[in-house]
Amino acid sequence: MSVPAGVSDSVAITCRNLRKKFVLRHTRSMKEAIVWLLTGRKGDLSKKFDALKDVSLDVEQGETVALLGLNGSGKSTLLKLISGVLQPDEGTVHTRGRVAGLIEVGAGFHHDLSGRDNVYLNGAILGMTQSQIDAMFDSIVEFSEIGEFIDTEVKFYSSGMYLKLAFSIAVHTDPEVFLIDEILAVGDEPFQRKCITKINELAAAGKTLFVVSHDLDLVASVCKRGVLLEHGQIIMDGEVHAVVKELRRRSEASAA
Amino acid sequence: MTQPVTDLVQPGRGRGIIDVYKHKFLLQLLVRKEIKIRYRGSVLGLLWSYVKPLMQFLIYFVALGVFLDMQRGTPNYAIYLFSGIVLVNFFTESLGNATRSIVDNRDLIRKIYLPRELFPVSTVWVSAAHLLPQVVVLVGACLLTGWSPSIWQLLAVVAAFVLTAILSIGLGLLFGAANVYFRDSENIVDMILMIVTWASPVLYVWPMVQRVMGQWFFLYQLNPVTVAVEVFHWAFWSPTLSPEQSVSISMPPDLLTVWLPSAFGVAALVLVIGQLVFMKLSVHFAQEL
């Protein structure tokens, strides 16, 4: 598959006619599948629904984009397609440079390893090299405010410490494109402020940010562009404040 | 540390097992993690890796070698048995864990894109790390009975190990991927592993099979695990025999000239099939897990 036509040289993410279908599988065993085949495939083994329908989107390098929408509108699915975790059923995704995500902070943590081991493991999972982690290590620990607990097994961490360390590793991975899913539930208020400052720094440094959050005021302060998804389709794409306003109007309308 | 502007790529499209090589550092960390957490909180730690095979060996030796008197037909039966068991242990552990590796790492696979081949490959490395202490025990026992191998026999040990590793990765990719869709795959593998111990000359000697199978004996020899076990016998067990004992019990004909290369062929074929199936199925891992 070739690069889609009509895309500028400075594009960071380009999606064309994306469609993602999910199968709700009812069966999990070979026996049921074989019985189903032998009995003449009566009934449907699975139900399908479209999480994304015909989504096309270009994000320029250095742009800060907020992906907005109510629950189930397909935001996380789109993020996973961009990160490569999922593959589209139709359409194409292309990205430029290293893409890293704060998708579910701490997914690569192992409870029985020390904080130090987890920094290396998680850093490597997010695509850092050994020398990069070595160079960043002190900065990661400092940012996370973990201090002397870095050599303690993470199962003894409080949930706040755990998330702070995970977030700290993620923001130090230094990718070109940053995917951020619901980061802002991390830690206490001072730490949240620190995170936002850090994210603004990344934006100022010309990183491409792609943010999913339900904290509308916050995304509006971090991002410039807003994209509104509803039932798997883009229904609005424009200046973030206008998009936030539209989402509020729609959610009030549906609540009423 | 900003990288130069690169070309557009499609995320999540891997090149299979070649990508694992590009993630050497992560592979190393994953292997180290598994070894570290295996004996967490235990006092004896890694010593268990020595104690367990030794115990297994002693049980077989006493029950089969002494009580059933296999020692009479097969001199140095203890060494014979142990060299086979060590190799089969490596195979069963690698394949069993590789089959479970994708499902066990579902949290990661669902959230972050990594070459998924990393997980089965890392389990084989972990098993290799557990093989080492067993080989140390084996070499110790061999030296006690006057083992003096040639350089070719030592090289053959490495070849048999590599052969088993290739086969384990191939089958591990195949069943690991299938396990995502059908958890039955775990049970199929458990059954295969049960058969493997008996389908190779671990507890008996190969001429017994040849007597029964006659002209179909080549089928038995096509199993790479069988060949690897026979190579281990040739390298560890036969150098401990006295000249008159060696005359009465020989190795299978053409072991190194025909069967070892053909076993590599079979293992390579399994690896290719495993990789192709894995690539096809791995596209939907994240949504199926």
Image (tube, grey):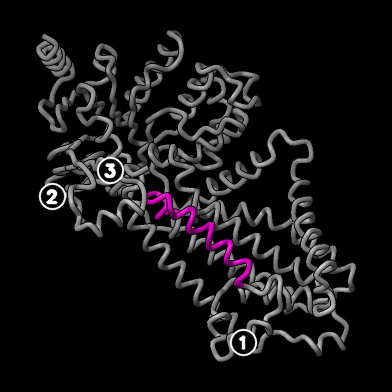
Seen in the picture, residue B244 relative to B101 is either above or below; the reply is below
Does residue B43 belong to the magenta stretch? no
Residues at marks 3 and 1, common chain?
no
State whether residue A155 appears in this view.
yes
- Mark 3 is on which residue type? Arg
State whether residue A10 appears in this view.
no
* Rendered image quadrant of residue A26: top left
Label 3, secondary structure: give it. Answer: strand
Residue beneath label 2, please? A5
Residue beneath label 1, please? B257
- Mark 2 is on which residue type? Ala
x 14%, y 11%: residue: A255
Magenta segment's dominant SS is helix
Seen in the picture, residue A218 relative to B170 is either above or below; the reply is above
Residue beneath label 3, please? A25
Q: Nearer the viewer, mark 3 or mark 2?
A: 3
Tell me the chain of label 3: A
Image location (x, y in percent) of residue B72: 84, 78
Q: Nearer the viewer, residue A226 or A154?
A: A154
Image location (x, y in percent) of residue A149: 63, 20
The segment highlighted magenta reads: B176-199
x 30%, y 37%: residue: A80
